[in-house]
């Protein structure tokens, strides 16, 4: 960039605009965008480990004999994301069955999620899903916790 700037200021400006446009396109895709810094309280790994472990938000023990394949896990993440997109996020937060999710900590990403709806949004992040695939052994029951919570939330008309 410095070489380009010295040799041709116009080319440098065009390069910066191009990079900015790419960044804006990425930020429009909510499924792969990481949470903005400062929106969630970031924790150290040691702090995060002190909180209640939630399925898909914490490392599970690596001693399971049967684990699901990566494709099965990703299909369930997509299915969960589809269900969440059809729900009213305010109703997710108002459902008394979800009150315990307020302030849940993702031990994989070391962030505290302030509301139940934020937990569901966090589960849809590609960066989080990749950490689940790398650090967790999914046996199949982990998604049930979240699907059951969505049953109580009225779906929007599609």
Image (cartoon, rainbow, N blue to C red):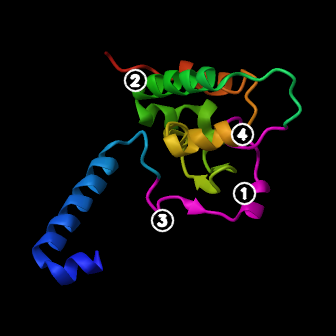
Q: Residue at x 73, y 28 (%)?
A: 138
* Position of residue 44 in the picture relative to residue 63 (left or right): left
* Position of residue 130 in the picture relative to residue 69 (left or right): left
CA distance separating discs 2 and 4: 23 Å
Of the image marks 1 and 4, the number of the one nearer the N terminus: 1
Name the residue beneath numbered marker 1. 48
* Position of residue 70 in the picture relative to residue 47 (left or right): left
**Residue 15, how many percent across, how many down?**
20, 65
User: Helix, strand, or loop for circle 2?
Assistant: loop
Q: Is residue 53 magenta?
A: yes
User: Could you tell me what secondary structure mostly forms the magenta stretch?
Assistant: loop
Q: Quadrant of the C terminus?
A: top left
Task: Count neighbours of disc 3 (C-alpha within 10 A) and say few if under 14, some if 14 to 19, many if 20 or more.
Answer: few
Task: Kindly identify which numbered label has been placed on residue 86.
Answer: 2
CA distance separating discs 3 and 2: 27 Å
Above or below — where is 67 with respect to 135? above
The region drawn magenta spans 35-61
Contact check, label 1 and label 3, Cβ < 8 Å: no
Q: Is residue 10 magenta?
A: no
Of the image marks 1 and 2, the number of the one nearer the N terminus: 1
Of the image marks 1 and 3, the number of the one nearer the N terminus: 3
Contact check, label 1 and label 2, Cβ < 8 Å: no
**Residue 13, how many percent across, how many down?**
15, 71
Q: Is residue 78 visible?
A: yes
User: Helix, strand, or loop for circle 1?
Assistant: helix
CA distance separating discs 1 and 3: 16 Å
Contact check, label 3 and label 2, Cβ < 8 Å: no
**Residue 120, how many percent across, how many down?**
53, 36
Snapshot quadrant of residue 23: bottom left
Q: Residue at x 27, y 48 (%)?
A: 25
Name the residue beneath numbered marker 4. 54
Name the residue beneath numbered marker 3. 38
């Amino acid at each position: 960039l410095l070489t380009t700037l010295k040799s041709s200021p116009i080319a440098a400006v065009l390069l910066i605009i191009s990079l900015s446009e790419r960044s804006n396109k990425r930020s429009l895709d909510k499924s792969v965008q990481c949470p903005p810094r400062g929106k969630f309280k970031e924790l150290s790994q040691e702090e995060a480990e002190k909180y209640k472990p939630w399925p898909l938000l914490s490392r599970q023990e690596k001693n399971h004999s049967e684990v699901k394949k990566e494709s099965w896990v990703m299909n369930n993440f997509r299915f969960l994301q589809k269900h969440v997109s059809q729900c009213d996020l305010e109703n997710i937060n108002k459902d008394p069955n979800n009150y315990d999710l307020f302030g849940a900590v993702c031990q994989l990403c070391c962030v505290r999620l302030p509301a139940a709806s934020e937990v569901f949004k966090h589960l849809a992040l590609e960066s989080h899903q990749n950490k689940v695939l790398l650090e967790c052994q999914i046996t199949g029951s982990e998604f049930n916790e979240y699907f059951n919570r969505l049953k109580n939330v009225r779906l929007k008309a599609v």
